[in-house]
Amino acid sequence: MKYKIHKYLIYCLLFLFILPLTLFAGCNRKKEPISKSGFYFDTIIKITLYDASKEYLLDECMELANTYEQYFSATLSDSDISKINQAKGAPVEVHKETIELMEKGLYYSNLSKGGFDITIGRLSCLWDFGENEGDIPLDTDIQLAVSTVNYENVVIDENRVSLKNPDTRIDLGAIAKGYIADKMKEYLNANGVTEGIINLGGNVLCIGKKANGDSYTIGIQKPFDDTGSPIAAVEVTEETVVSSGVYERYFQVDEKLYHHILNPKTGYPYENDLYGLTIICDKSVDGDGLSTTCFALGMEKGMELIESLPDTEAIFITSDGEMHFSSGMGTLIPYRVY
């Protein structure tokens, strides 16, 4: 039996529960929210501000999203990443933002000892969870793709990037949205925005506090819940809340779950008893990198990593539906469980 939940339904459900939660405590607010949505990076994004005089900045944020998609996409033929992937190992000159993002990706690739790897492009393309309705690739094809995955194949020389293995392919999809969210926040702050929410489909980044001084309440999705009901919620101000899990893109064959978080060393989805993982920290790009890194490490080692980092908290959701919180969740980040 093959079964798949369509990714766009999941994105819509995310907005159904995140948006009411984030706006719930603002019923007495004098400033009405203004927002703009778009479709970039294969997901719905939404920017919400609370100052009508800043409405023009919403269009500017969408332009930023478009620009960075042109840099980071692995599917657009003329993007920086596609040019690197098509160069057969030859050096390619790219934008400084592409270098910044790749360096951050390489940092987490090294931190996870390859559990997170930005050179997973051939493998992720082979599985194609965005469109795959239940076809498991041949193991020979999987192992061939695995042989091209090695973050140490990436060479950065100033603003040029080359690949030691010409068959290696870069994919920044696991970390790009966090970087872009941070860049949007920098831009909005520079233009006088002190209150707002940046939501890039699973990456929620808050700007300041609400007008009444309250924090934002961000819901965390209950895995595999078709109604979009939250399993918990956290209160944040300037922090980001980044969630990922096996319920985002997956299919089932013969009652076995195949999800999009792939183990670069085996070529198959991770099997580690985790359903979901949420990171709360200052930078959304770090939330992205840590969510995949901790998933790759598993709950025990992933929690050890979180406990060693300043101003960083996490919620691990295991396959039995239980939530496991890092030690600072009860003090640094107020939260509630539904």
Image (spheres, grey):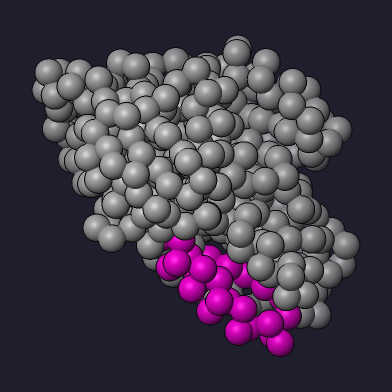
Q: Is residue 28 left or right of residue 88?
A: right
Name which residue lies at 74% across and 67% down: 189
Assign the C terminus to one quadrant of the image.
Answer: top right
Assign the N terminus to one quadrant of the image.
Answer: top left
Name which residue lies at 40% across and 43% down: 161
Residue 134's spot in the image, x, y percent?
Answer: 17, 34
Task: Answer above or below: position of 264 versus 251.
Answer: above
Name which residue lies at 36% across and 39% down: 162
The majority secondary structure of the magenta stretch comes to helix
Residue 301's spot in the image, x, y percent?
Answer: 60, 13
Residue 276's spot in the image, x, y percent?
Answer: 51, 31
- In the image, farthest residue toward the bottom: 53
Task: Answer above or below: position of 231 versus 191.
Answer: above
Q: Is residue 123 left or right of residue 262?
A: left
- In the image, farthest residue toward the top: 300
| Res. 215 visible in picture | yes
In depth, the one of 115 and 205 nearer the eye is: 115
In depth, the one of 105 and 295 nearer the eye is: 105
| Res. 12 visible in picture | no
Is 61 one of the magenta-colored residues?
Answer: yes
Name which residue lies at 18% across and 40% down: 133
In which image quadrant can residue 313 be found?
Answer: top right
In which image quadrant can residue 253 be found?
Answer: top left
Instruction: Read off the magenta span.
Output: 46-69
Is 226 one of the magenta-colored residues?
Answer: no
In which image quadrant can residue 139 be found?
Answer: top left
Task: Answer above or below: position of 145 versus 205.
Answer: above
Q: How many marks?
A: 0
Residue 44's spot in the image, x, y percent?
Answer: 43, 61
